[in-house]
Image (spheres, rainbow, N blue to C red):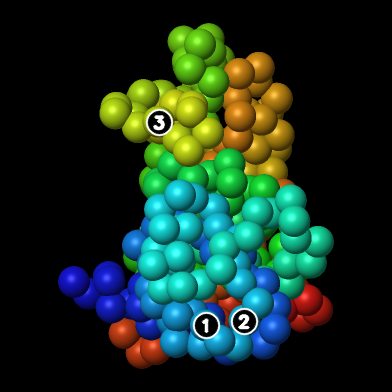
Amino acid sequence: MVHDELKKTASWAALRYVRSGTIIGVGTGSTTAHFIDALASIKNQIAGTVSSSETSSAKLKAYGIPVFDLNDVSLLPLYVDGADEINDQLQMIKGGGAALTREKIIAAVADCFICVVDSSKKVEILGHAPLPIEVIPMARSYVSRQLIKLGGCPKHRQNVITDNGNIILDVYHLNMRNPVQLEKIINSLTGVVTVGLFAERGADIAIIGTTRGAQILQKNYYTKC
Ligand code: 5RP
């Protein structure tokens, strides 16, 4: 499980950005699961968490880490989450774990978004992985037709209902040379809840787990991280 070790390397390296007494945003997926293990090792130093999925909430609670409703939280200094792909601009494809909508909401609130990935997720141009889109169930066919017009090949992810009661379309073959524009276009389709392109609000820092340790990529010199 080489990838899993690299995911662990990246996730544990994110601990250095956790400030004591604060609330931490926690994402979803196998990489984030390592971050939850890491967070548990300092659980008495943090005020608690907000979580992007029922799965992550259950794991956090099992460790005895408080999970707050985001509506009750006004300050969120840090959000840590994985990605399916990330480029040099720290724009991402997310949603492999179907938690993209809650992830995007937490990313919008957080001052600092740290993306933790193994080195296989780092790409030059996004789009090797399919693009997940959360869609209201009755809009599935309509949205699929619009995505085909955009050049994509949508596939309904079988047997998956999101935590919000919606379906996921995984879209292949979209041209992602302009991710900010594509994010806007897909978000504007009626029936789309969220597109898993995190381009407008990408990560502030990426921590890449490599065989030589954790590599840090930072977009701007000035971050709130
Ligand atoms: C969940 C996500 C995950 O962060 C993404 O799918 C990466 O997952 P993993 O850490 O298991 O490789 O966006 O919706």
Label number found at residue 43: 1
From the Cβ of disc 1, is ligand 1 less than 8 Å away?
no
1 vs 3, front mark? 1
Q: Which quadrant holds residue 119?
A: bottom left
The alpha-carbon separation of the residues under discs 2 and 1 comes to 6 Å
Q: Quadrant of the image for the C terminus? A: bottom right
Amino acid found under the numbered disc labelled 2: Ile
Which amino acid does the dot numbered 1 rest on? Answer: Lys
Residue 161's tag is 3
In this view, 83 is above or below 40: above
- For ligand 1, tell me if the residue under mark 2 lies within 8 Å: no
What's under tag 3, amino acid-wise?
Ile
Q: Is there a contact, CB below 8 Å, between mark 2 and mark 3?
A: no
Residue 130, x across and y down, in percent: 40, 39
Residue where numbered disc 2 is placed: 46
First reached walking from the N terminus: tag 1 or tag 3: 1
| 53 in relation to 140, above or below | below
Look at the numbered discs 2 and 1 and tell me whether their residues touch, using CB distance below 8 Å: yes
Q: Position of residue 110 (x, y in %)?
A: 72, 63
**Residue at horizontal 44%, vertical 26%?**
167
The CA span between labels 1 and 3 is 31 Å
- Residue 51 on image: x %, y %: 55, 58
Q: Is residue 121 visible?
A: no
